[in-house]
Image (tube, helix red, strand yellow):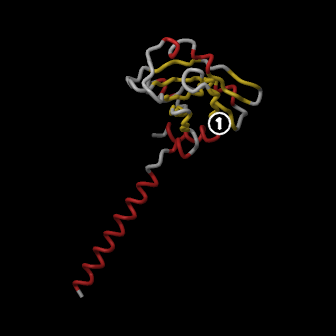
């Protein structure tokens, strides 16, 4: 009788461990990717990843990184070229604000700021894109447009659901 209780306890412990591991993998999913706010595209051997930066005015006022201010709609665009390009070329850092637009129902809006981020990655580069959030207050979906003549020679579109962005803002500010 004692042997069967031990066996039952071991089985219960194993089931508990297995259930914890499966719940951990479900909980470990990236909320930004799940909400469509982190999108990856592969074009002509170039990998592009657009990530929404949550709006959290309190953290932004304190100087925290990775968050946007109250009136900002911010994104990070990571680009990893197919081959070893000269990533120090001035064309990759200056005048890039003309490459990006935010498409809304009333037309398209230029970014308030488009800036290359010094990330230390010698194989790729990143851009910070900041748009006026007041333009999209009534929008459900907008599109980030990248007129890429630097890497892929294509017009890239990244649809963004603003309702999901608001959900991620609420999650991120409470962390």
Q: Image point 55% across, 38% down: which residue?
A: 39
**Residue marked by disc 1:** 159
User: How many circles with numbers are drawn on the protein?
Assistant: 1
User: Which residue occupies the extreme bottom position in the image?
Assistant: 1
| Residue 88 screen position, x and y as percent | 43, 15
| Residue 121 screen position, x and y as percent | 39, 25
Residue 35 appears left or right of 138: left
| Residue 9 screen position, x and y as percent | 29, 75
Rendered position, 159 above or below 5: above
| Helix, strand or loop status at disc 1 | strand
User: Which residue occupies the extreme left position in the image?
Assistant: 2
In this view of the protein, can residue 54 be seen by the observer?
A: no
Rendered position, 175 above or below 16: above
| Residue 20 screen position, x and y as percent | 38, 60
Q: Residues within 10 Å of mark 1 (few under 14, many from 20)?
A: some
User: Which image quadrant for residue 159?
Assistant: top right
User: Which image quadrant for residue 160?
Assistant: top right
Q: Nearer the viewer, residue 42 or 11?
A: 42
Residue 28 appears left or right of 96: left
Q: Nearer the viewer, residue 24 or 82?
A: 82
Quarter of the image where the C terminus is located: top left
Residue 75 appears left or right of 141: left
In this view of the protein, can residue 111 be seen by the observer?
A: yes
Quarter of the image where the N terminus is located: bottom left
Q: Image point 75% across, 25% down: which residue?
A: 107
Q: Image point 61% across, 18% down: which residue?
A: 112
Q: Image point 70% across, 38% down: which residue?
A: 140
């Amino acid at each position: 009788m004692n042997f069967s209780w031990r066996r039952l306890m071991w089985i219960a412990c194993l089931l508990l461990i297995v259930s914890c591991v499966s719940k951990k993998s479900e909980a470990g999913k990236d909320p930004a990717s799940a909400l469509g706010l982190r999108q990856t595209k592969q074009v002509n051997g170039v990998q592009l990843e657009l990530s929404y930066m949550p709006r959290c005015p309190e953290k932004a006022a304190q100087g925290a990184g990775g968050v946007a201010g109250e009136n900002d709609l911010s994104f990070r665009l990571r680009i990893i070229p197919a081959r070893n390009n000269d990533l120090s070329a001035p064309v990759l850092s200056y005048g890039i604000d003309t490459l990006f637009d935010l498409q809304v129902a009333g037309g398209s809006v230029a970014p308030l700021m488009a800036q290359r981020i010094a990330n230390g990655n010698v194989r790729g580069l990143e851009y910070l894109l900041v748009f006026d959030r007041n333009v999209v207050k009534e929008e459900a979906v907008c599109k980030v447009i990248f007129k890429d003549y630097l890497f892929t020679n294509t017009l890239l579109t990244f649809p963004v659901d603003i309702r999901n962005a608001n959900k991620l803002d609420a999650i991120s500010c409470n962390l």
